[in-house]
């Protein structure tokens, strides 16, 4: 009796007494539930991976968007402006010994400004090529300095051009006067570019989009 009851007790303790049809259904449900749970887990994992990938791509493109390329573009334009200004002012500056087209102080200021910021633009662009970036605070300070110096140079050049134009002792050379006026006008454009470069660099730096 004891031996015969022991297996039945173990069976009843292991599983409740359920009709055979219900037991079969329960097994089928259990078997069907296992793969469904695994499929749901895999689907959730894949969905989470896709969301993480989209988030990383979104963060990458937001941080590496068009805004980061604006300072190098401005530096290319500023480099071109410095070269054009040096070319325009060269003839009037070297032919002012007999006929004064531009004063010596203006020539010194102009060459100092154009050459200095031409070198700065070249160094900045070379740093971008070798992936060695300038700190944005230093770039902002140099852009502010460039804006002030270009504006002062433009004012001095245009002032000398106006005085030379109104002078009646030495009738000026028209072509050299055009060069002088062009140098002053392009210097004004350079000052505007440096101001825009300053604003954009400061905004990107404060947002953390550039170093």
Image: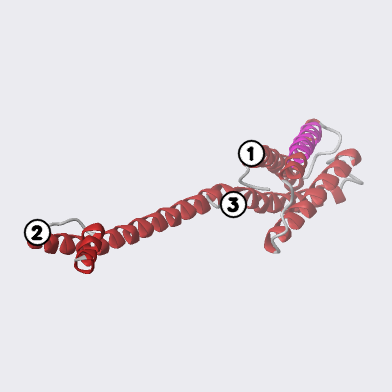
What residue is shown with label 1?
Answer: 196
Q: Which mark is residue 169?
A: none
Q: Secondary structure at mark 1?
A: helix
Disc with the residue nearer the chain's start (3 vs 2):
2
Q: CA distance from mark 3 to mark 1?
A: 14 Å
Say how many tags the image has. 3
Q: Main secondary structure of the magenta part?
A: helix
Q: CA distance from mark 2 to mark 1?
A: 84 Å
Per the rendered image, the range of residues in magenta is 143-163
- Residue 4 placement (x, y as % from top left): 19, 68
What residue is shown with label 3?
Answer: 69
Question: Left or right: 10 with respect to 61?
Answer: left
Q: Residue at x 84, y 47 (%)?
A: 111
182 and 205: which is toward the camera = 205
- Residue 64 placement (x, y as % from top left): 55, 52
Magenta segment includes 157: yes
Q: Which mark is residue 19?
A: 2
73 and 45: which is toward the camera = 45
Q: Residue at x 59, y 52 (%)?
A: 69
Question: Left or right: 58 with respect to 178?
Answer: left
Quarter residue 196 falls in? top right
Nearer the observer, disc 3 or disc 2?
2
The answer to whether residue 207 is above or below residue 129 is above
Nearer the observer, disc 2 or disc 1?
2
- Contact, mark 2 vs mark 1 (Cβ under 8 Å): no
Disc with the residue nearer the chain's start (2 vs 1):
2
């Amino acid at each position: 009796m004891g031996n015969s009851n022991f297996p039945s007790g173990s069976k009843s303790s292991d599983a409740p007494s359920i009709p055979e049809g219900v037991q079969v259904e329960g097994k089928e449900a259990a078997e069907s539930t296992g793969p469904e749970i695994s499929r749901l887990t895999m689907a959730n994992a894949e969905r989470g991976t896709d969301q993480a990938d989209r988030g990383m791509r979104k963060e990458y493109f937001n941080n590496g968007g068009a805004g980061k390329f604006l300072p190098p573009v401005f530096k290319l334009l500023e480099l071109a402006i410095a070269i054009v200004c040096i070319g325009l002012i060269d003839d009037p500056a070297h032919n002012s010994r007999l006929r004064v087209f531009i004063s010596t102080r203006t020539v010194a200021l102009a060459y100092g400004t154009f050459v200095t910021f031409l070198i700065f633009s070249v160094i900045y662009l070379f740093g971008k090529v070798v992936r060695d970036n300038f700190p944005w605070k230093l770039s902002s300070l140099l852009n502010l300095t460039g804006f002030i110096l270009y504006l002062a140079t433009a004012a001095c050049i245009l002032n000398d051009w106006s005085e030379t134009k109104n002078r009646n002792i030495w009738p000026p050379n028209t072509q050299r006067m055009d060069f002088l006026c062009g140098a002053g006008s392009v210097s004004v454009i350079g000052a505007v570019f440096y101001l825009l470069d300053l604003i954009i660099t400061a905004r990107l730096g404060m947002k953390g989009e550039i170093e």
